[in-house]
Amino acid sequence: MSRHNIVLSVNGKRTSLEVESDRSLLDVIREDLKLTGTKRGCDNGDCGACTVLLNGKPVNSCLVLAVQADGQDVSTIEGVALDDELHPIQEAFIEHGAVQCGFCTPAMIMTAKVLIEETPQPTREEIKKAISGTLCRCTGYVQIIDAIQSCGQSSK
Amino acid sequence: MKKFKYVGVGVNRVDAIGKVTGETKYAGDIKLPGMCYGKILLSAYPRARVLRIDTRSAESLAGVKKIITAKDIQGNNLYGYYIPHRPALVGEGEETRYLGDSIALVVAETYATACKALKLIKVDYEILTPLTSPQAAMAKGAYQVHDGVEGNVACNYELIHGDIKTGFDAAEVMVEQTYCTSRQEQAFLETESGVAFVDESGILHIYSCLQDPYDVVEDIYLALGIPKSKIHVKATPTGGAFGGKLNTTIQVQLAAMAYIAQVPVQLVLDREESFIFHPKRHPDEIRIKIGAGRDGKIHALEAEVISDAGPYAVRTHEVLGLTVSALVGPYSLPNVHLTGQGIYTNNLDSSAFRGFGAPQAGVAREGIVEKLARVLEMDSLFLRQKNFLKSGEETISPVLGDSPVSLDLLKDRILEKMGPFPESTPDTGKRVGRAFGFDMPVFDVSAIPVLCKSGVGIAVELFSDASASVYAGGTELGQGSTTMLAQIVAEELGLQINKVFVEMGDTWTCPRAGRTSASRLTYVLGNALLLATEKIRDTLIQRAAKMLETNKDELIFVDGEIKAKGSSSKGLSLQEIAEVCSNEGLKLREEGWFKFPEDRYMYGHTFMASAADVEVDLITGEIKVLKLVNVHDSGKVINPDLAKGQLYGGSIQALGYALTEDLIVQDGKLMTPSFAEYLIPTAMDMPEEFVADFVETPYPTGPYGAKGLAEHSLNTTTPAILNAICNAVDIDICTIPIKPEYILENIRT
């Protein structure tokens, strides 16, 4: 298996790595960068728990080869809070009871962040579509949608 | 009416910050120095004799620390709840019983090496014919999955009340149906995971996601022979469980890896392994028959349940017992004859899953009642109400105790929330149907016999800086027990909630509390906590009385202070008194041991109602849930936001159970081992209108009047959806999940 030198910008920080060609971005984030906030739910692209932003777009990082991310921007949950303050989306998730076991929460937050940036006041239908690629088994989605919608309304 | 600061308030979860920032460490996120990686070689066949296991190539792979087989196990090699008859590892000459049996364990320096080594282990099997249905397993001449168990009958139940023949003789109308419910997968997002290591004193430490740390100690001791005093189990924040992590999952195999290889090990099942390994909801075949008068009064109920227990006992006995008694539901039935059998097979294993047998019963019970309504041409809600249990009435299973019956109240509330029936517009090729479901689900008040005697324990310590720690043996699965306990301590001791730290699920620090299931933690731990905090309050008040030179009966806790009733002068701050007590060596760490006073009542009852409006597309057979309402009477609700979350979450699982979740096992093999094939609901599957509501009838023995609630939301939701479909398109539903193809093939109007 060949090894490659890649450079990722992870949460704004330039990071050099040497990785084998068959490693997924998810693997490299969790094992090499030790950022364990991004979760492995299925390793198959079915559950969305591994969602990160690649150049600002949500992707299933288990389906992206690390080498494919060479030279790109990678945003993970660890980069969402601003200095010592939680991001408004993180606050909203807490306020609205949108967190239960928390395993899908990082993925939901990454997806929500992009949605609010692109669609400042999303409807509930738009929110449902945006998060439909991330499975949640605990919450029944209601309070997650409430949380995201509240961010939309307040970001006027 | 006392106003509470924290109890009954939707306070934020105390563990939320770590979860929204990604800082919370689940078992798969833990990194220990020198940590190695484990993989389990699972059986290639549901039933086979293991002839030979050749580990030589695997052992010689660079980076492999140890390959473990049955011959390396020092203890009994057997474990398992209820009957310890599950092998930790199936050895040469022994037979596998299902695809999730373990043949060998790999411990290697990297995960990639462990996966490579797994492929290098060569196993020679003699493939045998598996028993792939309860019918096949009960047939004459079928092999015994467990030696000596005749007819593969794991357990059987019979519930008799009144005289069934008299009941049917009095009936003017009879309806009968056989329902087949599916094997539902818990589908927790976090797969079975754990880390384990042996420290310098020879103590084995396990950090893993689980629902019963004490049972894990028991199973490790049974299987591996390690003394219990040398086993420490700590529950990690768990990424969902729903009963699938109630019985020991991978912890015995993980313990063997760490103990025998003598290195720290992390074991995380991949999704396909997880689908195979842990037990699912029992698939049941329920033949049910009722006899009623033309006025709608039900005279007789008869049913037979055949339940696929899978290869091991685990909780089949308890689940089947609940299925049988839940067939009665919240109705007053004079003549009842119910039987149930749990049958061993070589399919995937069956055990606990939210609802614990009551969802299966709900499908059959509410289904047959709905069918009766159609035959009688009677409104099905009216029919149900006619047969509702009344307050003070004796129930068949004598556990009603002091739970006030609030079915009429729930009926009124759910009608109000549902509103008028949405008329289907003709010529659109769509039909709308509505249905209701009711139940009186159980929750543990003390149900474990041993804990009836010892009680359920909890420990609380108040520190001199007015912060507190709680040590509770239950586990945080996402349901919010950590928060519930913090709310109670903050309330009782007048603390800021962010000064309360709750540790859960550690067998070393937490008094014995039993399992986290059966919606029991609020009731048992809440009550134990009140006993502990009362002792601390007494200590503080007695000391404060001396300092304030008043009678202790005049003192009250108010906003972080202790002061005399009606006094306008400043009292003593909690911190002041706590410091004084601490400096004087007064006891500020107390245990509370809660024993339910009437040990004949093992369970309490809540009451619940669901209603659904569904739209069926006559051309495609597709089903859309337009509106779903759940109303529960679970006594006092400690945290409304968290409680609603349980109703929403369970209702979506119920929707999946009814419409989308089809775990297909053929010849003992799993045909749907991924989320691409086993479809759990996404946000797009949600009902258009989705309501969760509570009626709060205080429960006399519950903490603040609270009952359990987390497990119940499936019980009536699935049948409400199914029956709504039957009402939309005049169809009989006998098998779940119900697919569009079935609708199109069976539609009558």
Image (cartoon, rainbow, N blue to C red):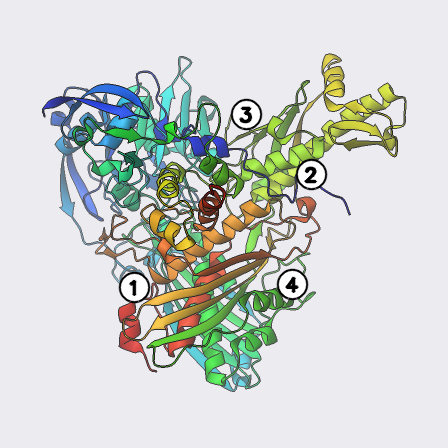
Q: Of the two numbered discs 4 and 2 on the same chain, state the one appearing first in sequence.
A: 2
Q: Amino acid at mark 3?
A: Thr
Q: Position of residue A73 (x, y in %)?
A: 26, 29
Q: Of the two numbered discs 2 and 3 on the same chain, state the one appearing first in sequence.
A: 2
CA–CA distance in space, label 4 to label 1: 40 Å
Element assignment for label 1: helix
> Dot 2: within a 10 Å radius of its alpha carbon, few (fewer than 14), some, or many (20 or more) residues?
some
Q: Amino acid at mark 1?
A: Gln
CA–CA distance in space, label 2 to label 1: 57 Å
User: Mark 2 highlights which residue?
Assistant: B5
* Quadrant of the image occupied by residue B655: bottom left
Q: Find out whether the residues at labels 4 and 1 contact each other: C-beta distance under 8 Å.
A: no
Q: Residue furthest left?
A: A2
Element assignment for label 2: loop
User: Mark 4 highlights which residue?
Assistant: B406
Relative to the observer, which residue lies in front, B271 or A49?
A49
Q: Provide the chain ID for the residue under circle 2.
A: B
Q: Amino acid at mark 4?
A: Ser
Q: Is residue A144 left or right of residue B7?
A: left
